[in-house]
Image (spheres, rainbow, N blue to C red):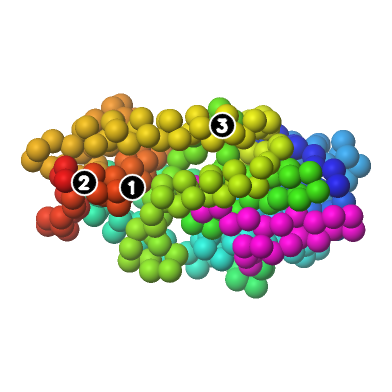
């Protein structure tokens, strides 16, 4: 089984995204890149180097449904004459009938984000959506933990690795313990636990950081020899990266708790202190990361939480 990495440009600050061609029948693409002319041209060129055309693809598998990873899924599916598209059922970003903005708005308001900021984030979100075409429900199928993607020679096992998003998935080639991990594992940066409604109860918040720590530990238990991430170079020493991630998370956690004054603070109050000067999408990501750390600190008994005028206020326990 040959795994071919095809870097594709994105319009986002994170830079190029890695698309992976599994050069084995049935020809399979893992992630697609965003819906831009530049991304599509780069993807076509990457496939051309492997003597593959889009029409040869039989499966399109998504690690998660952020625009830089799923944006071209529908157009590639159509060009490949109804290639199967697979994505975990807890993902929502690829769906036409998405409801998550209204749910996200409620989560932002509970986090103490001012109304003007919430509106700005809504406009930002609508702008980002243009980089992906939505899929109808009948145009994709589900992935589940421990499913197998079978090939003529070998298979990839689905490993549900929630955290970055609720439905994020990784894919394990057991023969050599190679993993394709999407944005669960990135060599140079720590993935952001994005603020999301809980997929089981959308009125609640998904506890992203706690789930992410479990996912990192689960990948560690697989003893991976090589991990292909969603951005940047592959990771050859997962143990070193795992420990580096834990240090970074623990340091950020301590900083977040330290920023809570005696009078208490909302997630927005802490985010403004933690990430001063952040703009555009970074303001949403700042709130996401802050909320994730506050949730974890609360679950560990470091902080108490109370609801005041529809906003969650944290105080040191």
Count of labels in the image: 3
Measure how far apart labels 3 and 2 are at the Cα level. 28 Å
The residue under the point 59% across, 34% down is: 239
The answer to whether residue 33 is seen in the rendering is no
Q: CA distance from mark 2 to mark 1?
A: 9 Å
Secondary structure at badge 2 equals strand
Return the residue found at the far left: 263
Q: Are marks 3 and 2 in contact (CB under 8 Å)?
A: no
Residue 32 image offset from top left, x and y in percent: 68, 47
- SS label for mark 3: helix
User: In whole angstroms, how far apart are the C-alphas of marks 3 and 1?
Assistant: 21 Å
The residue range painted magenta reads: 142-164
Please determine whether, in this image, residue 161 is positioned above or below residue 192: below
Name which of mark 2 and mark 1 comes first in the sequence: 1
- Of marks 3 and 1, which one's residue comes earlier in the chain? 3
- Which residue carries the number 3 mark? 241
For mark 1, what is the residue? 296
Residue behind mark 2: 303
Left or right relative to 46: residue 303:
left
């Amino acid at each position: 089984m040959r795994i071919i990495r095809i870097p594709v440009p994105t319009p986002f600050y994170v830079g190029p995204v890695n698309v992976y061609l599994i050069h084995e029948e049935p020809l399979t693409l893992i992630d697609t890149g965003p819906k831009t002319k530049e991304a599509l041209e780069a993807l076509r060129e990457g496939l051309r180097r492997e003597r593959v055309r889009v029409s040869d693809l039989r499966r399109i598998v998504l690690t998660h449904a952020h625009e830089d990873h799923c944006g071209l899924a529908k157009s590639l599916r159509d060009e490949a004459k109804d290639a199967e598209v697979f994505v975990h059922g807890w993902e929502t970003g690829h769906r036409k009938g998405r409801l998550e903005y209204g749910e996200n708005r409620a989560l932002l308001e509970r986090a103490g984000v001012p109304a003007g900021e919430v509106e700005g984030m809504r406009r930002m979100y609508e702008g980002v959506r243009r980089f992906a075409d939505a899929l109808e429900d009948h145009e994709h199928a589900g992935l589940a933990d421990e499913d197998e993607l079978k090939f003529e020679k070998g298979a990839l096992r689905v490993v549900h690795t929630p955290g970055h998003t609720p439905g994020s998935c990784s894919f394990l080639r057991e023969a050599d313990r190679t993993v394709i991990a999407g944005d669960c594992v990135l060599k140079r940066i720590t993935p952001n636990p994005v603020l999301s409604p809980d997929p089981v109860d959308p009125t609640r918040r998904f506890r992203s950081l706690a789930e992410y720590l479990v996912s990192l530990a689960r990948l560690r238990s697989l003893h991976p020899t090589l991990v292909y991430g969603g951005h940047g170079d592959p990771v050859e020493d997962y143990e070193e990266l795992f420990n580096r991630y834990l240090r970074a998370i623990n340091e950020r956690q301590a900083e977040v708790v330290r920023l809570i004054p005696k009078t208490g603070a909302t997630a927005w109050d802490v985010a403004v202190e933690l990430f001063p000067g952040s703009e555009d999408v970074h303001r949403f990501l700042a709130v996401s990361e802050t909320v994730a750390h506050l949730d974890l600190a609360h679950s560990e008994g470091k902080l108490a939480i109370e609801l005041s005028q529809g906003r969650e206020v944290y105080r040191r326990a």
